[in-house]
Image: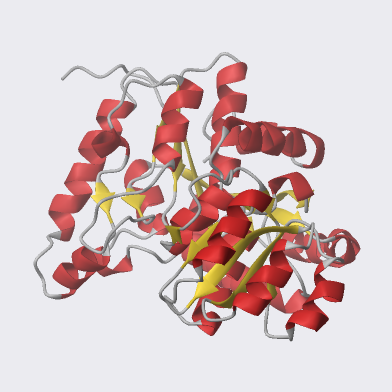
């Protein structure tokens, strides 16, 4: 098919690890480009958020992009590869053809970018996701002629080692680094020491975005989805936000005092601890109970939870595994709505060089 003789500005947003705000940054940049009059397309070539091991995608990032940018594209076009455990296993066995996969990505990219001035590409789970089929974010940047925005967390100077390794990996494709969700404690160190050091090594820093409570945490319904939990309460609303978790390993009497001091919390306790469950339901700052071990609580506890409007989430995993999972989910602050993207857009406008991340022309 005929393609216009023009260059499409393509930006690929990647991160060193999962849960760094990559989705919010990618979609905020897409909206910023659209608001300045550009026709913007979006693609997430490798989907990593899955509903099942076989590969049914639960990836809501393309869906949100489609709504925000008013795109007509289908999910399978925006996300041609679903990186499920089954897919990875087949790839290791040699049953997935990397060349065919690359061709599929290019085909969908060309289709999606046909009417676009700019394409925003969201990377996989992390910088190295997709290596089994030679489609890491670095490979994708090369394949799609994209400039890379590397989203990074920062807590201590030692984190820079990984950043330098990533810069070496991306080479000339790296446009720059955006530090996101930086704590107050780390902010000064970044500004005074780390940014000058990186720029001295030829690595551009687009900005340093501070941690923002509005972007932290997840709704109870999102937490339920992420944990694969069974919701035991039909009437209790699940739209409250959870920003921390408390482990109910203390006695019920101790819990009364401690739980009155928490806010926006999920309480994690065994399904076989009705005493702790009852004590938790009387604490104002507990937004939901996550019951571990697959043990159903007594009907009286469920009834009391319904009356208190506190959802009960039942998981099959043990407490330690559940705690680790909840920590990951809460820290990531899933990007699932327009308000999150709008907030990130405001933060980028205040703390980052959006014009540099969305150059008007290619800089070779």
User: Which colour assignment does the render follow?
Assistant: secondary structure
Q: Nearer the viewer, residue 291 or 200?
A: 291
Q: Is residue 276 left or right of residue 95?
A: right
Quadrant of the image containing the N terminus: top left
Q: Is residue 184 left or right of residue 50?
A: right
Q: Nearer the viewer, residue 339 or 96?
A: 339
The reply to whether residue 315 is visible in this rendering is yes
Q: Residue furthest front?
A: 300
- Where, by quadrant of the figure, is residue 85 drawn? bottom left
Residue 193's place in the image compared with 118, above or below, is below
Q: Is residue 356 left or right of residue 312?
A: right
Q: Residue at x 33, y 20 (%)?
A: 72
Give residue 79's position: percent from left, percent from top. Answer: 31, 42
Q: Is residue 171 left or right of residue 192?
A: left
Give residue 215's position: percent from left, percent from top. Answer: 69, 47
The reply to whether residue 309 is visible in this rendering is no
Give residue 10's position: percent from left, percent from top. Answer: 45, 35
Q: Residue at x 37, y 56 (%)?
A: 48
């Amino acid at each position: 098919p005929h393609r216009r003789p023009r260059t499409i500005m393509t930006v690929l947003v990647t991160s060193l690890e999962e849960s760094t705000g990559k989705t919010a940054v990618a979609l905020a940049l897409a909206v910023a480009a659209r608001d300045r009059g550009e026709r913007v397309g979006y693609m997430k070539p490798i989907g990593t958020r899955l509903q099942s091991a076989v590969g049914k995608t639960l990836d809501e990032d393309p869906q949100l992009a489609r709504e925000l940018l008013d795109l007509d594209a289908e999910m399978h076009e925006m996300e041609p590869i679903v990186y499920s455990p089954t897919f990875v296993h087949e790839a290791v066995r040699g049953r997935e053809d990397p060349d065919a996969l690359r061709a599929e990505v290019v085909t969908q990219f060309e289709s999606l970018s046909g009417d676009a001035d700019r394409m925003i590409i969201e990377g996989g789970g992390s910088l190295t996701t997709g290596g089994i089929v030679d489609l890491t974010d670095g490979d994708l940047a090369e394949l799609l002629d994209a400039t890379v925005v590397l989203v990074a967390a920062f807590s201590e100077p030692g984190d820079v080692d990984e950043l330098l390794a990533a810069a070496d990996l991306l080479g000339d494709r790296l446009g720059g680094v955006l530090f996101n969700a930086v704590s107050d404690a780390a902010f000064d160190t970044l500004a005074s020491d780390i940014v000058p050091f990186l720029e001295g090594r030829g690595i551009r820093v687009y900005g340093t975005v501070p941690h923002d409570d509005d972007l932290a945490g997840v709704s109870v319904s999102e937490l339920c989805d992420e944990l694969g939990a069974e919701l035991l309460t039909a009437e209790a609303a699940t739209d409250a936000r959870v920003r921390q978790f408390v482990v109910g390993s203390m006695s019920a009497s101790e819990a009364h005092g401690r739980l009155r001091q928490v806010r926006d919390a999920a309480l994690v306790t065994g399904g076989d601890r009705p005493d702790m469950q009852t004590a938790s339901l009387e604490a104002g700052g507990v937004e939901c109970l996550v019951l571990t071990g697959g043990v159903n609580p007594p009907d009286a506890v469920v009834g009391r939870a319904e009356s208190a409007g506190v959802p009960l989430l039942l998981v099959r995993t043990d407490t330690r595994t559940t705690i680790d999972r909840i920590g990951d989910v809460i820290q990531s602050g899933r990007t699932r709505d327009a308000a999150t993207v709008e907030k990130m857009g405001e933060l980028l406008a205040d703390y980052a060089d959006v014009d540099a991340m969305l150059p008007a022309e290619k800089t070779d």
